[in-house]
Amino acid sequence: MSAHAEPMRLVLLADEPEWAVLLRARLAAMGSAVPLITAPSWQAASSLFDDGGSGLLLATPAYQPVPGCCPLPTVLLLEEEPAEAPADVYDWLVRDNLSVDLLRRCLRYAGERARLQNTLQRLAEQDPLTGIANRQGFQTLLAARLAEHQGRGLVLGHLDLDNFKHVNDSLGYQGGDRLILQVVGRLKAQLEPGDDLARLGSDEFALLIDNRRDPQRAERLAERITEALSEPYWVDGESLLLGCSLGLAHARAGESADPLLWHAHIAMQQAKAAQGCTHHLYDERIHRGARSMADLESELRRALRRDELELHYQPRLCLASGRIVGLEALVRWRHPERGLLGPDEFVPLAEESGLIVPLGYWVISRALRDMQWLRGRGLPALHMAVNLSFRQFQDSQLLATLGRLIEERGVDAQWLEFELTETAVMRRSEQVQQTMQALGRLGVRFSLDDFGTGFSSFVHLNNLPITLLKIDKSFVAGMGARAENRQLVRAMINLAHNLHLEVVAEGVENAEQLALLRQFGCDQVQGYLISKPLPLTDLARFLVFGIRQPLLAGVPC
């Protein structure tokens, strides 16, 4: 047998002893010292290859393993020449034609083909730049290590390099490759025998850490890794600093690879929320909360598609005339399991996830539709106030979308009012001013919501096309407690009037507050004393029958 075939172990699966005698005779004639191992089945022989050694399986058709069960190349032993090539085998041998030369060629061919397949498999599972395992190879390795240790004492790390794309953009891909090699060198310097390293993507790595001897080792290693990676890199004569985010997750008994990978990824994302080189250990309690929020976000997306949202309207009363002159549109979510949810339970999530933009457009569209519905029933025109988030205010499609919606509904834009918070108005004054002016040209007017809770500059507000100030309900509620609070509200109203702005007081809940606000010269009020937020049909009945002049009859001027 040639030198190429000699390292292989030969396993024979056959019930006829003649095959063993014949093969041993031919191997002896070849001068091969490789023993022929006989076994009753592949299951019985498979343990001989737990060390990963190479081998060749010789089997008769009756003993041929099921495809995918045996990793060894298989040569089929036949009594006669087949009519067509057998499936799922490397080669075949016919008993009457089995010569020394034929056996030698068969073993050489099978050996070379097996080595080629092993090389291709290794290349498929190896990162060509660094020589460490790639994602596919690491998946195989992780599954094997988890099975070997039943998940005990292993910690998976998911490492992501921050801003690596900028390095590629500035230094080119070759410079990026040189940086990756430095990163891998630093990682390898921190690892010990029993640890594994893999490259999952261009700037992502996996570390499988053996924690069995020291339960705290993984976290200490994470600190050393983040410190090592935070040191400057030298690439093409330039000094670079690179942040990294490392997430750690402990393997649990009986856990498969997929949930462990996901847990490490979640921890990495949590580490990425902090700036610089940081690491984070996966915590099931934190993840449970994050998962709950993620579920709620997914439900909110469905709610937008399934029309589970609705608008309720809170009327605004003019203190001079006693008439309802405006409405504020307030979104509600009729959740199929949790009932009617107020905006505090889902609007912050919409802000965080970016859903506030499609949600905002839904609110505007529905409010315009309901304005049209009210006018169609002969009710007088009312100002419709819609809360506009700063995120939506920045949306490039705001002007075009709003213009289209106004045209589609046939509503006069002068009756549409956008409420902006102080924080939004003050964040980017130039951009805010330009957008407000463009919307103003459509006829829209603006009010400043929750006035007094932010950091408004009256000089700055005077430069913006704002028509109304809405005094926050916390100031209104405090008027009955202290004289200073009453003087503060009076001063706010006077300052607004000096800037030629109307004033709306929010959160009016009793006659005493109403009397004080009328005394201070407040223009409009809004709150439960006037009406709670109402669905559209209830609002229509209120506007027809709920005239509010009687409310003002006993209020002193």
Image: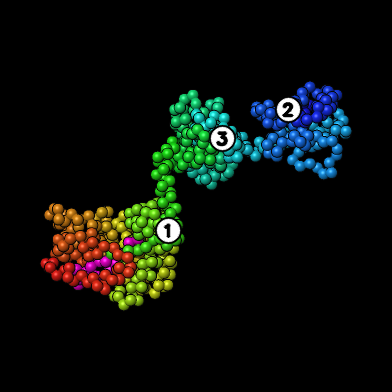
To which residue does mark 2 refer? 39
- CA gap, disc 1 to disc 3? 39 Å
Number of other residues with Cα within 10 Å of mark 3, as a class: few under 14, some 14 to 19, many 20 or more: many
**Amino acid type of the residue tagged 2 in the rendering:** Ala
Q: Which mark is in front, 1 or 3? A: 1
To which residue does mark 1 refer? 303
Which color scheme is applied?
A: rainbow
* Residue 142: image tag: 3
Q: Which mark is in front, 2 or 3? A: 2
Q: Quadrant of the C terminus?
A: bottom left
Magenta region? 315-331
Q: Main secondary structure of the magenta part?
A: strand
Q: Earlier in the sequence, mark 2 or mark 3?
A: 2
Q: Which residue lies at the image location 81% right of the left edge and 36% below the top edge?
A: 92
The picture places residue 9, in percent across and down from the top left corner, at: 74, 27
Number of other residues with Cα within 10 Å of mark 1, as a class: few under 14, some 14 to 19, many 20 or more: some
| 449 with respect to 228 (left or right) | left
The picture places residue 262, in percent across and down from the top left corner, at: 50, 41
* Residue 322 belongs to the span the image colors magenta: yes
The picture places residue 517, in percent across and down from the top left corner, at: 17, 63
Q: Which residue lies at the image location 81% right of the left edge and 27% below the top edge?
A: 17
Marks 1 and 3: CB-CB under 8 Å?
Answer: no
Element under disc 1: helix
Residue 42 quadrant: top right
